[in-house]
């Protein structure tokens, strides 16, 4: 990871970016590096994962962050990609999107949803809906399947909280330094909430 400091990152500019960015920021933090926007020299936004991989393959960027399934497909289609590029880190299994229902939802509606979800790939209309959501199929998941995603989200919230606290503390410290110049207090104690 250290070798990528001040290099150019290419990444897809799709709706799943928030989770990719959260994972990348956690990876950087775990390696005692600054967050994505400060760590990389330039961030190139590509139309999709494939174009982000090709940007790296054709040396228009120094690294990329993409979904593993896209990378594997491109390696199958062009084995030279797999020989030329190296995976330096992989995220845990992250659920990028899901649908849910309330506990008090009508059981007949839930049952109908499950039946439709199981057979969506069997019709052109169903396949079009699945493509619209940029997924391959609908599968039932449990709360256990969401564990890694939840952990990632909680880590991202912790990073965000620490960053706010640092900024808050830093600005308060400067403010108190200015005050102490005028009033010369012996102790300055403050509490963040």
Image (cartoon, grey):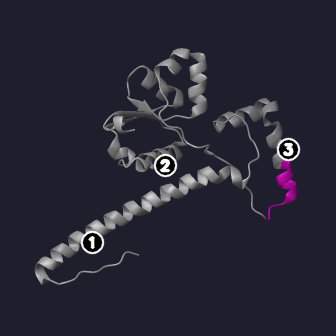
| Label 1 vs 3, first from the N-terminus | 3
Q: Which residue is mark 1?
A: 172
Q: Is residue 25 found inside the magenta-colored segment of the image?
A: no
Mark closer to the observer (1, 3)? 1
Give the residues drawn in magenta, as a range: 104-112
| Image x and y of residue 59, in percent | 38, 22
| Image x and y of residue 47, in percent | 49, 31
Q: Is residue 172 left or right of residue 13?
A: left
Q: Which residue is mark 3?
A: 115
Q: Which residue is mark 2?
A: 22
Rate crowding at label 2 as few (under 14), some (14 to 19) or many (20 or more) other CA atoms within 10 Å.
many
| Image x and y of residue 160, in percent | 43, 59
Q: Between 122 and 8, which is closer to the camera in this rendering?
A: 8
| Image x and y of residue 70, in percent | 58, 29
Q: Please, which residue is most extreme toward the right here? A: 108
Question: Residue shown at 30%/37% (left/top)?
Answer: 6
Q: What predominant SS class does the magenta segment belong to?
A: helix
Q: Between 109 and 63, which is closer to the camera in this rendering?
A: 63
Alpha-carbon span between mark 3 and mark 2: 34 Å
Question: Residue shown at 67%/48% (left/top)?
Answer: 98
Question: Residue shown at 86%/51% (left/top)?
Answer: 111
Alpha-carbon span between mark 1 and mark 3: 57 Å
Regarding mark 2 in the picture, which secondary structure is present there?
helix
Q: Quadrant of residue 106?
A: bottom right
Residue 186's place in the image compared with 156, above or below, is below
Decide: marks 3, 2 in contact (CB < 8 A)?
no
Regarding mark 3 in the picture, which secondary structure is present there?
helix
Question: Residue shown at 61%/45% (left/top)?
Answer: 94
Mark closer to the observer (3, 2)? 2
């Amino acid at each position: 990871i250290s070798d990528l400091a001040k290099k150019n990152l290419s990444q897809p500019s799709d709706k799943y970016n928030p989770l990719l960015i959260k994972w990348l920021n956690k990876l950087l933090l775990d390696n005692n590096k600054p967050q994505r926007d400060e760590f990389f020299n330039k961030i190139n936004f590509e139309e999709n994962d494939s174009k982000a991989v090709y940007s790296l393959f054709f040396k228009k960027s120094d690294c990329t962050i993409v979904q593993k399934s896209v990378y594997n497909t491109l390696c199958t289609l062009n084995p030279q990609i797999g020989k030329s590029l190296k995976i330096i880190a992989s995220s845990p299994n992250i659920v990028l999107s899901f649908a849910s229902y309330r506990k008090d939802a009508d059981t007949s509606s839930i049952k109908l949803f499950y039946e439709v979800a199981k057979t969506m790939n069997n019709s052109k209309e169903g396949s079009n809906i699945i493509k619209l959501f940029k997924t391959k199929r609908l599968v039932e998941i449990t709360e256990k399947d969401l564990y890694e995603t939840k952990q990632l989200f909680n880590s991202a919230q912790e990073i965000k909280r620490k960053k706010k606290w640092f900024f808050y503390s830093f600005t308060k410290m400067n403010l108190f330094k200015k005050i102490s110049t005028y009033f010369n207090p012996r102790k300055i104690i403050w509490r963040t909430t």
